[in-house]
Image (cartoon, grey):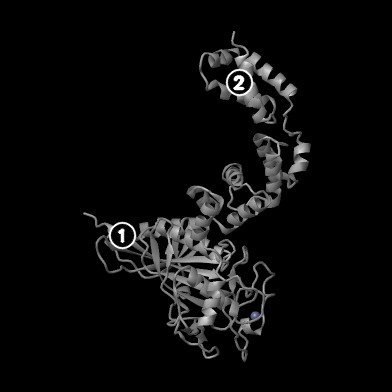
């Protein structure tokens, strides 16, 4: 008989704060600069320098705490987390230990459930080591990331499936992006996730021995990595073995969790209070000022899109899926004030094309250009069908809609004479369908309309064509 196990997962998410400068010095906080060019004596850990706390980093941490329903501590303490690693020249990281800036709170999963948070604390990032290909034993270090402001968001061990862990991360990322706390770019490492995973027999309350799984640097890696680690532990336990507490690294290429070298998992940090920074004191006025400056959160925006623009709940959900997409929608509407048409276009042709391009990024079309296209359509210059062709060309070429309509010869044909000729040709070529329609089969009209649109390459004006087609068939009734 095999015991049945329940996985218990806790997530630790590091989010880089969107400040202009680093957390304790004036160096720029920016990704992609040449190695070791965004550094100074403070973030390099030279002797005799003193850290100065970046006020903006504190505000963004409070903002995250507000958005996630945390208690914000009026007094929190910075601490030194001591360890040796080549990417950490100071030999310690300034973090917060037993007095973090935020406690409690929760991340909604989007289906009515939510996951409790333990805490959010402020800390500085370390540098980055590289092991260049073909470099043998050589390692290089880039210290640009040293001192980049982070918040670490720690969940309770209260997630019970890889699926929920995935959903937690998706919803957390959305909130951090919406509040402009973090840009959420997992590829560039501005959002990073580690998971603590343990198993326990179903029905038991105490936690089993956990492993820490690192390097989950995409949504996909988070789900697959946790699934694989659960399966690995199940196999060990089912075979009568015991789980060893260890740190594992997710190898996305091979799809397996790999044990890290013991040197890399030495966890004796010996925290002590940071003597160079006073306690962080937050006044009621300060907390109120941050509350007053909070951007709109996803749930509020979804609600507003329904009331302000009259959108259906589902559409409002899709359009507010990311802060960028919601902003794009609202900018189009500002220039073309017909929200229902804009929503239809984004939910239809826009998302279809985005899916074909296999990305989540917005398509390379400005909201102003899309508004112009929809105005051309509404004014009768192009039919909706031709408008979709123009849109595809806009994405492909970056040209404006008016130019493309001319270039592709897609001006809508509303001229009675020209359209009547096409209708007559289509009816002559499809006598069976005409007879069926006259025999009462209304559905055939759609087919015939499709033939007419095809003959006009999508340029026929449906408002002119629909009544014209109907009356032309009726005229054939003996
Ligand atoms: Zn610096």
Real-space CA distance between mark 2 and mark 1, rounded to the nearest whole angstrom: 64 Å
Q: Is residue 10 left or right of residue 208?
A: right
Q: What residue is shown with label 1?
A: 6
Residue 477, image quadrant: top right
Q: Does mark 2's beta carbon lie closer than 8 Å to ligand 1?
A: no
Q: Is residue 378 visible?
A: yes
Residue 37 % position (x, y): 69, 75
- Residue drawn 43% across and 78% down? 267
Dot 1: what SS?
A: strand
The image shows residue 55 at horizontal and vertical percentages of 59, 80
Q: Which mark is residue 92?
A: none
Residue that lies at the very extreme toward the left in this rendered image: 1
- Residue that carries the numbered disc 2 in the rendered image: 470
Mark 2 closeness class: few <14, some 14–19, many ≥20 residues within 10 Å = some
In the figure, is residue 9 to the left or right of 325? Answer: left
* Residue at (60% x, 12% y) in the render: 431
């Amino acid at each position: 008989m095999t015991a049945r196990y329940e996985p218990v997962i806790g997530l630790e998410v590091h989010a880089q704060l969107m400040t202009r400068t680093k957390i304790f010095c004036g160096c720029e906080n920016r990704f992609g600069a040449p190695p070791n060019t965004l550094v100074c004596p403070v973030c390099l850990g030279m002797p005799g320098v003193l850290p100065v706390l970046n006020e903006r980093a504190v505000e963004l941490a409070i903002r995250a705490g507000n958005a996630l329903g945390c208690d914000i501590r009026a007094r929190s303490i910075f601490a030194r987390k001591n360890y040796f690693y080549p990417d950490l020249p100071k030999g310690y990281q300034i973090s917060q230990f037993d007095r973090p800036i935020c406690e409690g709170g929760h991340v909604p999963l989007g289906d009515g459930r939510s996951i409790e948070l333990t805490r959010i604390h402020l800390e500085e990032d370390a540098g980055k080591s590289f092991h260049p290909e073909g470099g043998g034993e050589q390692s290089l270090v880039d210290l640009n990331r040293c001192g980049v402001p982070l918040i670490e968001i720690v969940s309770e061990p209260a997630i019970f499936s890889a699926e929920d862990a995935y959903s937690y991360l998706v919803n957390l990322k959305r909130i951090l992006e919406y509040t402009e706390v973090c840009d959420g770019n997992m590829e560039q490492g501005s959002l990073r996730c580690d998971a603590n995973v343990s198993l326990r027999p179903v029905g038991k309350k105490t936690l089993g021995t956990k492993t820490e799984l690192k390097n989950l640097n995409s949504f996909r890696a988070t789900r697959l990595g946790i699934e694989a680690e659960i399966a690995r532990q199940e196999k060990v336990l089912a075979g009568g073995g015991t789980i060893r507490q260890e740190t594992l690294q997710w190898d996305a290429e091979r799809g397996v969790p790999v044990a890290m070298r013991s040197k890399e998992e030495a966890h004796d940090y010996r925290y002590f209070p940071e003597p160079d920074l006073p306690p962080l004191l937050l006044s009621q006025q300060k907390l109120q000022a941050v509350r007053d400056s909070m951007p709109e959160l996803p749930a509020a925006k979804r609600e507003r899109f329904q009331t302000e623009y009259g959108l259906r709940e589902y559409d409002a959900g899709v359009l507010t899926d990311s802060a960028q997409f919601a902003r794009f929608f609202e900018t189009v509407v500002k220039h073309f004030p017909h929200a229902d048409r804009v929503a239809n276009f984004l939910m239809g042709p826009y998302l279809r094309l985005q899916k074909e391009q296999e990305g989540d990024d917005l398509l390379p079309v400005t909201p102003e250009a899309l508004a112009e296209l929809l105005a051309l359509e509404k004014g009768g210059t192009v039919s909706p069908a031709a408008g979709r062709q123009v849109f595809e060309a806009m994405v492909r070429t970056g040209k404006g809609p008016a130019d493309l309509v001319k270039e592709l010869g897609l001006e809508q044909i509303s001229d009675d004479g020209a359209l009547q000729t096409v209708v007559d040709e289509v009816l002559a070529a499809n006598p069976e369908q005409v007879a069926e329609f006259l025999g009462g089969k209304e559905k055939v009209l759609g087919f015939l309309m499709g033939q007419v649109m095809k003959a006009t390459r999508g340029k026929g004006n449906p408002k002119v064509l629909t009544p014209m087609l109907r009356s032309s068939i009726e005229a054939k009734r003996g």
